[in-house]
Image (cartoon, rainbow, N blue to C red):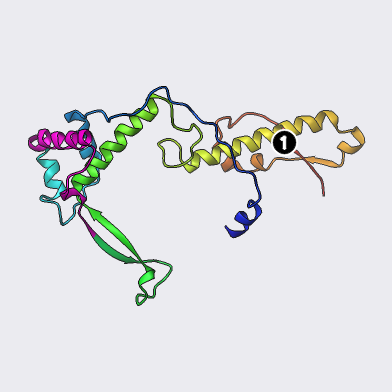
């Protein structure tokens, strides 16, 4: 990591193109009971000691509690703040894996265990915010983390696709411009094609193609 930072320290900053929004987000849309039910049922069934009832019991009784929870969530969205009680959390210090010395305080990291309802409100705000960003096309199209369907696997396939396209283009250039006397000393090969697992992951797997040119040894 230090070598990468040192090698790119003098690089010019990247100017990301800005996307002007045609509208502004002044308030979050209210939730329906179906929205709140979807968020609650898709959340992990984890509880905090500060919860008035266990999470599994809340889910089992959701058909009774859902109208009241929906009103509480929408009130938080309308007023722009969370009630005092859900702001409380249990802080537990956990030892870092790389530092087994338990006598040094800096070797611990704090882990916050908040109430289930605070997580429901948090996920509701995130759901409403993502809905607005997707609706107005404000999210970066090439974001490769922290977004659904934009994982690191997508980044790997994108880089692999660019490498394959570049080397295939290089192959076509060599095949038309290298003199016959020199062509006999060249070996055409492609690292991507030599890897069956990498080739199988590509959408064009099974197509016939030539390989990029590298000098023979």
Quadrant of residue 102 in the image? bottom left
Query: Residue 14 appears at what percent x and percent y?
Result: 59, 40
Residue farthest toward the left in the current orientation of the protein = 64
Residue farthest toward the bottom in the current orientation of the protein = 103
Quadrant of residue 93 in the image? bottom left
- Bin the neighbour count of mark 1 within 10 Å (Cα to Cα): few under 14, some 14-19, many 20 and up: many
Q: State the count of labels.
A: 1
Give 71 or 157, whichever is nearer the viewer.
71
- In this picture, residue 199 sits left or right of residue 217: left
- In this picture, residue 186 sits left or right of residue 34: right
Query: Residue 74 appears at what percent x and percent y?
Result: 18, 33
Q: Residue at x 60, y 55 (%)?
A: 5
Q: Residue at x 37, y 75 (%)?
A: 104
Secondary structure mostly seen in the magenta stretch:
helix
Segment colored magenta = 63-90
Query: Residue 105 appears at what percent x and percent y?
Result: 35, 72
Quadrant of residue 196 in the image? top right
Q: Which residue is mark 1?
A: 211
Q: Quadrant of the N terminus?
A: bottom right
- In this picture, residue 200 sits left or right of residue 88: right
Residue 35 sits inside the magenta stretch: no
Residue farthest toward the top in the current orientation of the protein = 22
For residue 105, above or below residue 150:
below
Q: Residue at x 56, y 42 (%)?
A: 197
Residue 88 sits inside the magenta stretch: yes
Q: Residue at x 19, y 29 (%)?
A: 34
Local secondary structure at mark 1: loop
Give 115 or 173, whichever is nearer the viewer.
115
For residue 152, above or below residue 89:
above
């Amino acid at each position: 990591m230090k070598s990468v930072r040192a090698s790119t320290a003098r690089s010019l900053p990247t100017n990301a193109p800005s996307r002007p929004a045609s509208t502004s987000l002044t308030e979050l849309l209210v939730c329906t009971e179906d929205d709140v039910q979807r968020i609650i049922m898709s959340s992990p069934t984890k509880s905090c000691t500060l919860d008035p009832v266990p999470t599994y019991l809340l889910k089992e009784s959701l058909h009774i509690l859902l109208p009241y929870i929906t009103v509480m969530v929408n009130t938080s969205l309308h007023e722009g703040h969370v009630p005092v009680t859900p702001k409380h959390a249990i802080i537990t210090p956990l030892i870092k894996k790389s530092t087994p010395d338990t006598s040094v305080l800096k070797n611990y990291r704090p882990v916050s265990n908040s109430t289930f309802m605070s997580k429901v409100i948090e996920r509701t705000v995130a759901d409403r915010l993502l809905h607005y960003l997707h609706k107005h096309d404000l999210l970066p199209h090439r974001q490769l983390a922290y977004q659904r369907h934009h994982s690191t696997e997508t980044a790997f396939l994108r880089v692999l696709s660019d490498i394959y396209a570049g080397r295939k283009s290089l192959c076509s250039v060599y095949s038309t411009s290298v003199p016959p006397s020199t062509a006999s000393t060249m070996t055409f090969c492609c690292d991507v094609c030599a890897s069956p697992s990498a080739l199988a992951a590509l959408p064009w797997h099974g197509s016939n193609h030539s390989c990029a040119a590298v000098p023979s040894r």
